[in-house]
Amino acid sequence: MAVEAGLAVAANRSGFNVRKTAGWVAAIGIWVVPLLWTDLTTYLTLTIAGVTMGVLLFLTASGLTVIFGLMDVLNLTHGAFFAWGAYAGFSLLNVLNRLGWVEAAGLGRSTGSLVLVLLLSLVVGAVLGLILEKIIIRKTYGNHLKQILITMGAALVMTEIIKIFWGPNDEAIAVPAAFQNSWDLFNVVVNKFRGVAILVGGLVFVGIQLVLQKTKLGIIVRAGVENKEMVQVMGYNIQRIFSGVFAAGAGLAAMGGVMISIFNGHIYPGMGDENLIFALIVVIIGGMGSVTGSFLGALMVGLAFNYVAFLVPKLALGVNILIMAIILLIRPNGLMGRN
């Protein structure tokens, strides 16, 4: 009996290792397979574009994985936070543009305007997140069906409020002058804002990891996810901590919104719904609650979309669903999700 149990455990571990290896092969293979069909210059151009799209998606998905993965809250208002962050940044950029800090600015003022816009969007998203968590989310903890219904309704209301304040039409968003042109690096044309986006996304990833892994707050949050009662017994207000986590996730979504809107050059009220779908795909691929997994998943989605859009344009929209399905078949919990 003991021998059979041992064999079963060994078989399970073997199967887990095979699935884990296959998952990592898929994650790494997506970087090199396109070299079979493209020349080096085209490959580098597509790869830089894919990495840029990936880190921009991560900015949005990071907030979702914090809320969904760590707090077990199905938050469909995430797209609305994304849109509110974009419109808040749009308004501030218009003000700064009149002061000469955007379209007629040098590197210093352009950088300053971008930092101010990111900080404003973070604050706006966090404040909206706190309000929403206190009013409606707190009453739905542990009930996913209620969370889906009430956050879907809240997202519709928030989108309609955007239309009231800013109008229903598309709006062009100003891009800081220092980030408008491109670099020519060994015949590879790189848009300057792509480099900025990669830098911002990398800094956000490192910052989240440091907070979760190296700070007392991060330890408390992770412990609260595993055992809320034990954290409360130790004297910590877990409800206040979870409110802060929700606000942080909403703020990250808002930052993603303003970065993607500047990258695309325009905004519209329904932009959050489209990006929510991408964020959900990224979180599912990466694994619930794993920031590193979301980062890898975002890169996979960004790279796959750009490679396939170049090689087989008709498959570009469906390739990310296909990747998600394959990853879930190989690794049901995602690339780095908990078993």
Image: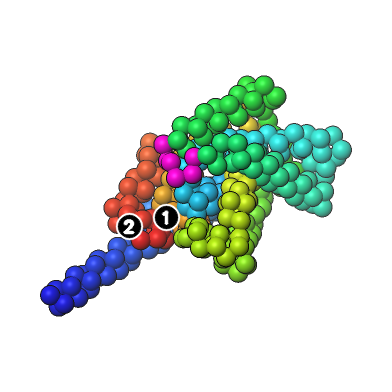
Please name whichever residue, 276 or 40, is drawn nearer the observer in this view of the structure.
Answer: 276
User: Which residue sits at x=66%, y=48%?
Assistant: 193
Please name whichever residue, 140 or 289, is drawn nearer the observer in this view of the structure.
Answer: 140
Sequence-wise, the earlier of marks 1 and 2 is 1
Please name whichever residue, 57 or 119, is drawn nearer the observer in this view of the structure.
Answer: 119
User: Which residue sits at x=19%, y=75%?
Assistant: 6
- Marks 1 and 2: CB-CB under 8 Å? yes
User: Which residue sits at x=56%, y=36%?
Assistant: 136
Q: Does the magenta stretch include residue 141?
A: yes
313 sits to left or right of 155 = left
Work out whether 111 lies above or below 203: above
Write down the residue under mark 1. 287
Quarter the N terminus occupies: bottom left
The tag on residue 331 is: 2
Asked which secondary structure carries label 2, the reply is loop
| Residues rendered magenta in the picture | 140-145
Q: Position of residue 115 (x, y in %)?
A: 75, 50
Judge whether residue 142 can be spotted in this image. yes
Q: Position of residue 157 (x, y in %)?
A: 58, 26
Residue type of the residue flagged with mark 2: Arg
User: Which residue sits at x=62%, y=51%?
Assistant: 240
Asked which secondary structure carries label 1, the reply is loop
